[in-house]
């Protein structure tokens, strides 16, 4: 019930391309869905987040698409840049608590 | 703001030794989280505190692990005795009551030989 499944585990994209990372969850009590970005040797940092009352949220080149009925959400990185190369984690949190449940992570490499 | 501060950044110890990891949350944050990150298991929540009180420690792997938060500015995660399988990066994170974002520290890379 608490699991968040993330795919793919790794992704290679050419500079300028679109990177797409997908997550699926089971617990319908989840009401907050953030994406975190982690560079080597650093802690994860919030990139963008969405609540289930909207189907899409865009911040610059980063967009979250949310499908409540399918219990899926995805991160799209438009015009991917080498500086976007990092590990990305989706997460989910229930409305009753404080705890984030993280997906397994996706290691993105953007080739110049 | 200095962000979440963790020390040490790297720790190498031998099996059986006691290890203490330290965290200073962002001032004014009332929730603190300890995570462990490994290649095999990803990012796992170990324990979290609200207002210095442990709320959920179900992620603590076993009795060798303990965590304390004696005040709003300081928390420790202790492993005694340490084992090679405890080798991981340990993160501390904090957040305020009024905002969703958890802010992570830089982590402590623990190696148990």
Image (tube, rainbow, N blue to C red):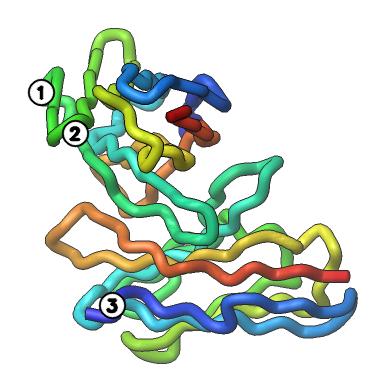
SS label for mark 1 = loop
Q: Chain of mark 1?
A: A
Give the camera-side residue of B101 and B109.
B109
Q: Which mark is residue A32?
A: none
Q: Chain of mark 2?
A: A
Up the image or down, B88 lies above or below A72; here it is below
Q: Sort mark 2 into few (<14), some (14-19) or many (20+) by Cα contacts within 10 Å.
A: many
- Residue A68, x across and y down, in percent: 24, 15
Q: Residue B30: name its quadrant.
A: bottom left
As measured in the structure, the alpha-carbon distance from the residue carrying label 3 to the one carrying label 2 is 24 Å
Question: In this figure, which residue is indicated by the disc labeled 1?
Answer: A54
- Residue A39, x across and y down, in percent: 46, 51
Confirm whether circles 1 and 3 share one chain. no
As measured in the structure, the alpha-carbon distance from the residue carrying label 1 to the one carrying label 3 is 30 Å
Q: Is residue A56 left or right of residue B50?
A: left
Q: Is residue B19 left or right of residue A103?
A: right
Up the image or down, B94 lies above or below A70; here it is below
Question: In this figure, which residue is indicated by the disc labeled 3?
Answer: B26
Q: Residue at x 23, y 26 (%)?
A: A64
Q: Sort mark 3 into few (<14), some (14-19) or many (20+) by Cα contacts within 10 Å.
A: many
SS label for mark 2 = strand
Residues at discs 1 and 2 in contact (Cβ within 8 Å)? yes
Question: How many labels sit on residues?
Answer: 3
Q: Residue at x 32, y 18 (%)?
A: A18
Q: Sort mark 1 into few (<14), some (14-19) or many (20+) by Cα contacts within 10 Å.
A: few
- Residue B43, x across and y down, in percent: 54, 48
Give the camera-side residue of A61 and B16.
A61
Question: In this figure, which residue is indicated by the disc labeled 2?
Answer: A50
Give the camera-side residue of A27 and B5.
B5
Residues at discs 1 and 3 in contact (Cβ within 8 Å)? no
């Amino acid at each position: 019930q608490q699991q968040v499944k993330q795919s793919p585990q790794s992704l290679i994209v050419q500079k300028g391309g679109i990177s797409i990372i997908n997550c699926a969850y089971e617990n319908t009590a989840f009401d907050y869905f953030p994406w975190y970005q982690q560079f080597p040797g650093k802690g994860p940092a919030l990139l963008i987040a969405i609540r289930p009352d909207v189907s899409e949220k865009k911040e610059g080149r980063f967009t979250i698409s949310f499908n409540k009925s399918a219990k899926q959400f995805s991160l799209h990185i438009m015009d991917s840049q080498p500086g976007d190369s990092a590990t990305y984690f989706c997460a989910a949190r229930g409305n009753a608590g404080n705890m984030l449940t993280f997906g397994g992570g996706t290691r993105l490499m953007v080739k110049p | 703001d200095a962000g979440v501060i963790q020390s040490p950044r790297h720790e190498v110890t031998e099996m059986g030794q006691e290890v203490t990891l330290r965290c200073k949350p962002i001032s004014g944050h009332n929730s603190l989280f300890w995570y462990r990150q490994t290649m095999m298991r990803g990012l796992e929540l170990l324990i979290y505190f609200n207002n210095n009180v442990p709320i959920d420690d179900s992620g603590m792997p076993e009795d060798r692990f303990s965590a304390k938060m004696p005040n709003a500015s300081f928390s420790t995660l202790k492993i005694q005795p340490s084992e090679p399988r405890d080798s991981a990066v340990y993160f501390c994170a904090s957040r305020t009551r009024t905002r969703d974002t958890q802010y992570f520290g830089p982590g402590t890379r623990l190696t148990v030989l």
